[in-house]
């Protein structure tokens, strides 16, 4: 059975993806093939569109730069797996005020679906909106199921898609699975979710909790925040290290060096 690791952050841009990518690299070096998954991601529209255009990939796939970066050192991942590694992807307005649309599942798991929010249906159906910036045309949007959904209350809707992706990835027999949260949201999807190994990134500091076996109980549809787990961490043993503030080109190596010192593998 694959060893599971969970990378959590205090907020957006805390460094989760950089640290998660370093974790995959270390695990690959120490114990073999590893794969990283971002169960739920949430991109602002303009950032997603820029990412998709820069990706310049012709297949009918949505981009997810976080999962590409997370799996930079994975021997199991290819860019064809991008939706498998990001099973639920929200695209939101520029100010995070509401979700424009939601893509769940993938063609690899035969459950790919697009959901369009009622609030954005008219706007997105205009041919001038983000033309050539997503792998769906206007006709797709007009046929898409329209409903009301929210990022913070999406546990129930997204859980089956995440489980199907994880199941297919497990068929590849990875030695390790790394799950990254989104902002302060915890990447859990089961009702009673066991988190054995946890890495928390906050204020340039990395905290490692190994063999903690923390059980997160999701009793509602609301996504769990890192702060909800604070009481559960108080009695857990941890190792902590502070990353230096370095230039962008050196951040990956700094995360790798800091995390490697903390891990007992």
Image (cartoon, rainbow, N blue to C red):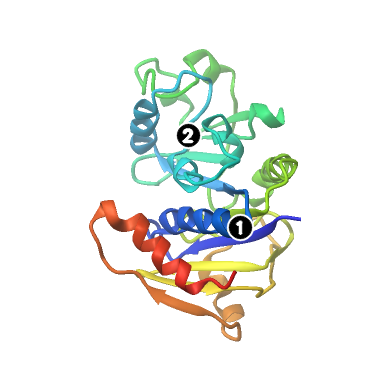
* Quadrant of residue 192 within the rendered picture: bottom right
Left or right: 164, with 92 as reference point? right
Q: Which mark is residue 222?
A: 1
Observer-nearest residue: 46 or 34?
Answer: 34
* Quadrant of residue 43 within the rendered picture: top left
Observer-nearest residue: 17 or 28?
Answer: 28
Q: Residue at x 39, y 39 (%)?
A: 93
Left or right: 131, with 144 as reference point? left
Q: CA distance from mark 1 to mark 2?
A: 21 Å
Observer-nearest residue: 87 or 120?
Answer: 87
Res 5 seen here: yes
Q: Residue at x 67, y 68 (%)?
A: 196
* Quadrant of residue 12 within the rendered picture: bottom left
Regarding mark 2 in the picture, which secondary structure is present there? loop
Q: Residue 239: x and y, percent?
A: 50, 79
Q: Is residue 198 above or below residue 178?
A: below
Q: Which residue is mark 2?
A: 119
Which label sits in the foreground, 1 or 2?
1
Q: Residue at x 64, y 55 (%)?
A: 176
Q: Is residue 123 above or below residue 221?
A: above
Q: Residue 136: x and y, percent?
A: 50, 20
Q: Residue 52: x and y, percent?
A: 40, 29
Q: Quadrant of the C terminus?
A: bottom right
Left or right: 170, with 89 as reference point? right
Q: Residue at x 71, y 55 (%)?
A: 2
Mark 2 Cα-neighbour bin, 10 Å: few <14, some 14–19, many ≥20: some
Regarding mark 1 in the picture, which secondary structure is present there? loop
Q: Residue 3: x and y, percent?
A: 68, 59
């Amino acid at each position: 059975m694959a060893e599971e690791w969970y990378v959590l952050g205090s907020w957006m841009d805390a460094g989760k993806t950089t640290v998660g990518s370093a974790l995959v690299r270390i695990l690959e070096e120490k114990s073999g093939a590893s794969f990283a998954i971002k169960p739920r991601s949430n991109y602002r529209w303009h950032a997603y569109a820029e990412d998709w255009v820069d990706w310049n990939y012709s297949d009918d796939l949505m981009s997810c730069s976080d999962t590409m970066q997370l799996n930079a050192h994975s021997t199991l991942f290819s860019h064809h797996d991008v939706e498998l590694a990001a099973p639920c992807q929200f695209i939101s307005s520029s100010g995070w005020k509401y979700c424009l649309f939601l893509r769940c599942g993938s063609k690899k798991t035969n459950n790919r679906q697009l959901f369009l929010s009622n609030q954005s249906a008219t706007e997105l159906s205009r041919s001038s909106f983000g033309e050539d910036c997503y792998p769906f045309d206007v006709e797709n949007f007009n046929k898409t199921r329209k409903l009301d959904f929210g990022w913070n209350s999406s546990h129930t809707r997204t859980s089956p898609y995440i489980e199907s992706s994880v199941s297919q990835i497990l068929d590849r027999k990875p030695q390790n699975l790394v799950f990254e949260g989104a902002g302060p949201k915890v990447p859990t999807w089961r009702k009673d979710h066991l988190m054995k190994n946890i890495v928390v990134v906050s204020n340039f500091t990395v905290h490692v909790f190994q063999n903690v076996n923390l059980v997160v109980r999701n009793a509602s549809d609301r996504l769990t925040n890192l702060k909800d787990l604070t009481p559960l961490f108080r009695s857990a043993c941890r190792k902590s290290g502070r990353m230096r503030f370095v230039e962008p080109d050196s951040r990956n190596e700094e995360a790798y060096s800091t995390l490697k010192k903390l891990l007992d593998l």
